[in-house]
Each structure stands twice: as C-alpha cells, then as structure tokens.
Image (cartoon, grey):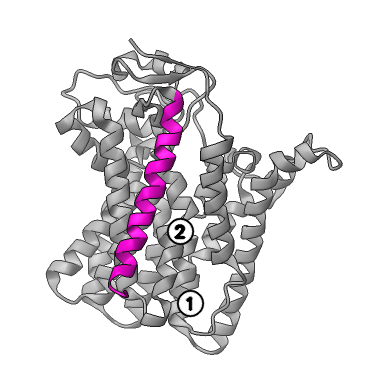
Amino acid sequence: MKKLFPILSIFAFLMILAITIYAKVQNYDLNLSSMINIWEGFANLNPQYIPSGFVIYKDGGYDGQFFFLLSQFLFNDGSLEFPVLDSFYFRFHRLGLSIVVGSIAYLIGWKFYVIASLSILTFFHILSSLTMYSLLSDENKKLFLFYLFSAFSFLSTQLLVSDSLLVSFCIISLALLLIQKSLLTIFLGAVYMLLALFVRETSIFIFGPLLIYFILNKNWKKLTAVLIPLSIYLSFYFYTRSLSIPEPGTLPLRFQDMVDFPLFGFAKSFQGFLIFEIRSWVQNFAKIFLFILYLILILNLTQMKKAIQQRNWKLVLVLLPLLPLLAVMTIAEEGYWRNFDNLARMFVLTIPIVIFAKQIHSEYKDFGFLAASGLLMGFIVIRILFITKQMTFFISQ
C-alpha cells in the first residue's frame, strides 16, 4: 500500500483538477481558451495575437493573458510587433512560463496553448510532488499531500499563471543541488534554478539561503553552480531595465505603486465594509482567511529564534525565506488585498517551506498552517464548482 500511496494521491489530484476544469469551461461551451482570461480591452489592443474562436471577456481578464501574449511574441517569425501589456517592466523580466509553454505551443499551434500550459504546469507540479515525497522521511511522507493539494499551486494552474511552475522548479532545483553530487545533476540543478529565476525573481528568496548554506559548508563547486544562473538572470534583469521601452503598457507600474505602509493595504481594503451585515462578511471571508494564514506564518517565524539559540542552522535557513515573503505581504497595497487570487498567489512558496521545516526538526510546530491551507483548497474547489458565475463573453473572429 505504501508504494501505491503517491500514485493514488496523484490520481485523486488529477481527477479533482479535471472536474474543476470542466466546471470552469462548461459555461463557455467547453472552450478551453476561456481559461486564458483575455479581456476585450487587451484583445482590441493586440488583434494580431488573438486567434479566431477564442473566448474574450467583456467584464475583465487576468494575468494569464499576458503570458499568452508574450509566448507568441517570443516565438513569432518577426512579423508581430511587441504586444501591449499592462506594464512592460513588470512582465518582461518574468518570461519563464512564456518560454517553456510557448516552445510547445509554437510547435503544436497557438490554438492549443491552454493544453500545452495545463500539461506543463501539471507535469512539473506532479514531478516536484514526487521529488518532495522522495526527500521526506517515512514518518513525514504523508506531508507531501499538503503540497500536492496546495491551494496556491492549484489556483495558479486554474489561472494559467506562473506560480505553480515557480515552486516546482525551486523544489526540483534544490533537490538536485543539495542531494546529488555528480556534475550532471548539479548542472541540471543550476538549469532549473535559472528557469525558476526567469519564471519569477522572487525565487531568489529561496536560493539566497542556499548560497549561505554552501558558503558555510565551503562547498565551492556547488556555490559556483548557484552563482552562474544568478549572474545570468541578474544580467538579463538589468539589461531589460536599460532597454528603450517598446510599449510601456496601459498601466506602467513602479515598485512604489505596488506597496503601502505595513498593513495599510489590508486596512484600506475594508473600505465600505459593513460590520453588521452578513453579506459584507461573506464577501470578505476569503481575504480574512488569508490574513489568518499570514498571522499563522508569523507564529511560525517565532521558532527561528529558538532554532538560532539551539544552533539549528539548517532550520534557520529553511525558515529564512519566510521573512521576505511575509514582508511583501505586509507592504502589499490595497489592490492585492482586495483581490483574492492576487493575494493567495503570494503564499505559493510557503507550504514547501513549512513541510521541509517539519522534516528537519521533529518538534517543529506549524500552528495549524498546513491544515488551514488544506481547508483553503476545499474552499477553492467549492468556489469553482458552485460559486463562480459565468462572465459576459464573446468569441473572437
């Protein structure tokens, strides 16, 4: 039964994924392109990028449309002008998902972009889940279920955005760099690290402690293997900052536009909240639940002090990425706190961190974080199946 446990778990995950995808697309005549979330405004600004037969929303879209547009731009024959996005700088240094999925969609056709995207995201999520399963001790192997059924990775896959791929690449890279010793596996670990950085630069929160670990252990070979992809990505990042902007976007964002004073964004998001009305509580339930998860993660951080006192440096380094992740949530502006999907995606790296902390230290307490994240997964499935309503749409010609 032990051998069947991960297989049966993955089968259950795939069944839930298939059911929820069907529930989402049935409102749009089973048209998978509805998952890209293309808004009419960006479709009108980028008509040459929109194949016929695609679902276009009149009421608004989501970030999946930008990955789709950039995928086509990267793999076109030079006939396409740079697409109009919301913000050039905010999107163009996060090309990882567009590169990986676009390389497949280019070969099979852009009408099959959603199939390519779902296949890539699901494959690497399962691969990273099995990688985690192999790294956990026998008594902790059941914890891999919290990652396999991560609400945050699951949401990312449903939205066709990059967060799921980010955490998958991070886990695979860490496993190859930390556990393996051959030059080939170290090289592959460095490649996955580079891919993770290109998916989203916040992966540096994970790889920063890895640098410290290799320095403390004087493992210069692996330190070099980590520094090379980091140098390549930083060179690319600063190069894009020096480019003359082909199209700044409809809403060019700067860092200061996306932050506020600590928790001011959370407080402002309650403007118009009626404390004695049940409807207001229902509308803000998900946000309040995520804030509770945020507070639980702060409690998790309190164990870092104890780990420092006990000189448990491995546990300290595992927990270290929680500091910048929580800092980003703390200073997030009002728009993030108002949008459940945006806010939930900030948590995507936290579940593996807590799981590996429990693996390293048998007495580690997560204060119910993993259990609460499991409840959130249930809420997301219920929202897709029973709450989400059909949006106003039309089919592109």
Badge 1 marks a residue whose secondary structure is helix
Instruction: Name the residue at 70% across, 42% down.
Output: 284
Say few, some or many: other residues with alpha carbon within 10 Å of mark 1 (under 14 / 14 to 19 / 20 or more): some
Q: Within the magenta stretch, is there residue 14? A: yes
- Which mark is drawn over residue 61? none
Measured as percent of width and height from the top left, residue 37 is found at: 43, 28
Circle 2/circle 1 CB separation < 8 Å = no
On screen, 360 above or below 380?
below
Q: Position of residue 244 (x, y in %)?
A: 34, 28
Q: Quadrant of the C terminus?
A: top left
Residue 114 is one of the magenta-drawn residues: no
Where residue 326 sits, quadrant-wise, is bottom right
Comparing marks 2 and 1, which lies closer to the viewer? 1
Give how far across and how far down residue 178 sits, in percent.
Answer: 28, 74
Residue stretch in magenta: 1-27
Secondary structure mostly seen in the magenta stretch: helix
Q: CA distance from mark 2 to mark 1?
A: 15 Å
Q: At which x and y percent is residue 144? A: 40, 67
Residue type of the residue flagged with mark 1 = Lys
